[in-house]
Amino acid sequence: MKDNTTHFLLKTIELILTPEEAANDTLTRKCIESVINDSHFEYQIIKRSIDARNNQIKINLKVNLYFSEPVPNRIIPKVYPNVSDKPKVNIIGFGPAGMFAALKLIENELCPVIIERGKDVRSRRRDLAAITKNQIVDENSNYCFGEGGAGTYSDGKLYTRSKKRGDVDEILATLIQHGADENILIDAHPHIGTNKLPRVVQAIRETILKSGGKIHFKTKMVDFIIENNTLIGITDQNGLNYFAENTILATGHSARDVFYLLHNKKINIESKPFAIGVRVEHQQSLINKIQYGRNSANDLLPPASYKLVHQTKNHGVFSFCMCPGGIIAPCATAPGEIVTNGWSPSKRNNTFSNSGIVVTINPDDLIEYKQYGSLAGLKFQETIEKKAFKAGKNDEKNNFGQIAPAQRLTDFLKNKTSTSLPECSYNPGLISAPIHQLFPKNITEALQEGFKEFGKKMYGFLSEDAIIVAVESRTSSPVKIPRHRETLEHIEIKGFYPSGEGAGFAGGIVSAAIDGQNCAIEISKKYTPKS
């Protein structure tokens, strides 16, 4: 994906500019000239970040300088071969792990056969509208299930720490090839935006199909076909079998039926750490003021974000999936539960900002669920989500409704049910409820301590108009599917490659994409002649 053409690169320099200098090419060039004492150059921005400390807003740029040669293209599009007659590999799930596994298989001349329980992005959008407007949850097509996975409609955040697991730039370059903005290669915390990401996902689908890959939407995997401890195929809800020598499981963190299937078939799975909490929402103008100070009205600055962490005696409390200029969305995957998440459009220009504020769940928190073994965390999740549904005064008899329990943040800290609620972006509707009673006491106390500490770090954060909405429970999978460290095959079942967030090996779009690629690479080695 990278341009390997030789260019005369003098050096890479780092600049600290004002927002005005960084936004204007002429001013940026003058700043470079003052550093190198030369005006005969071209430049290319490699990285860009914002430093808002001490109310002195600075833009940090890392820049490559070129002399005597034009600036090289950062992206050389890949050419994908036709693999329609090549060996088939099953991929269960068409989220980031499944999509990038499929692309890598095609690169290595193998044919992906994708089984996706949900619908394509266009059809899926109607089901999201049904959740928001009519409070009807389709168990197979929602914010978590469908083409592109959970990330398609949750902002497309691309920041990752998983840089040692694979080539992050390759993932970003592939997204750019399929329609994402080139700025995702530059920005320190890149995102695509919920309004743009579906088109990127659709373009990836078209690449796979043009190359001879197969995609089966509205097709739910209900069973594994195993012989002699080897996975040789899968069965869908209609009784159809899909045979292949290798299968990648990439079903995401919310496919509970898959975890139950593995458990019932006595296939080794493990409990893993996860977190649970609430969504907190503020006016974006307030967050801008807190983070940017007197510069908060500067139109050259993006809507401000934050990242918060606090360690209590027994739990970590942290912000998760912070969405500047975003909305809180209903993300249940089954009737009778309330689940929230957040997303932002590409411009992040909505009135509100929101973030998950969550508490790590330890084994000691799951003692009353220990009879469920490796599914203890999953059962705990389910219990809290059903309590949130009940607290929302939804129709328990028919498992109908998506009204979420909510509370003013300041009332939550006082263990007081709110007598009124501020305006909020959560469209299905809210009802005042004692969220301080929703969680086990120690989890509530950890959340309260965390919020108080965050208020010290961000003066004004504990606003009367800040609202919390429950429940934020799908931060990551509560289950891990163990696999060999080198081959990435399941530790017991040959030909079975658990991948991505649902398997417990990723935590976001990019890390899941990398993990899917890595599984595809390991499978490809089986078809590479040994020298």
Image: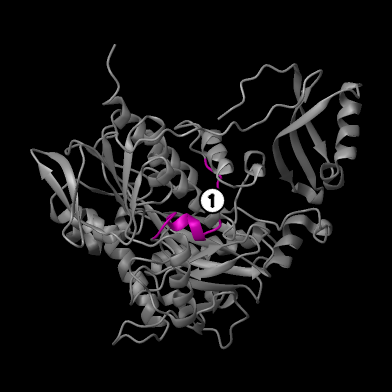
- Residue 514: percent from the left, percent from the top? 44, 38
* Image quadrant occupied by the N terminus: top right
Seen from the viewer's position, the closer of residues 33 and 233 is 233
Q: Which residue is drawn at 44% across and 32% down?
A: 165
Q: Is residue 457 left or right of residue 391?
A: right
- Residue 15: percent from the left, percent from the top? 80, 33
Q: Is residue 3 left or right of residue 41?
A: left
- Residue 156: percent from the left, percent from the top? 54, 53
Would you say residue 366 is visible in this rendering? no
Seen from the viewer's position, the closer of residues 292 and 29 is 29
Seen from the viewer's position, the closer of residues 98 and 320 is 98
Magenta: predominant secondary structure element? loop
Considering only vertical position in the picture, is 333 above or below 273?
below
Residue marked by disc 1: 200
Considering only vertical position in the picture, is 452 above or below 424?
above
Please tell me in which quadrant of the rendered image residue 183 appears: top right
Q: Is residue 109 left or right of residue 226?
A: right
Q: Residue at x 33, y 43 (%)?
A: 499
Start-end of magenta stretch: 146-160
* Image quadrant occupied by the C terminus: top left
- Residue 130: percent from the left, percent from the top? 45, 77
Considering only vertical position in the picture, is 105 above or below 122?
above
Three-letter residue code for mark 1: Val
- Outermost residue on the top side: it is 531
Look at the numbered disc 1 and give the secondary structure of its residue. helix
Q: How crowded is mark 1: few (under 14 residues within 10 Å), some or many (20 or more)?
A: many
**Residue 362 covered by magenta stretch:** no
Would you say residue 162 is visible in this rendering? yes
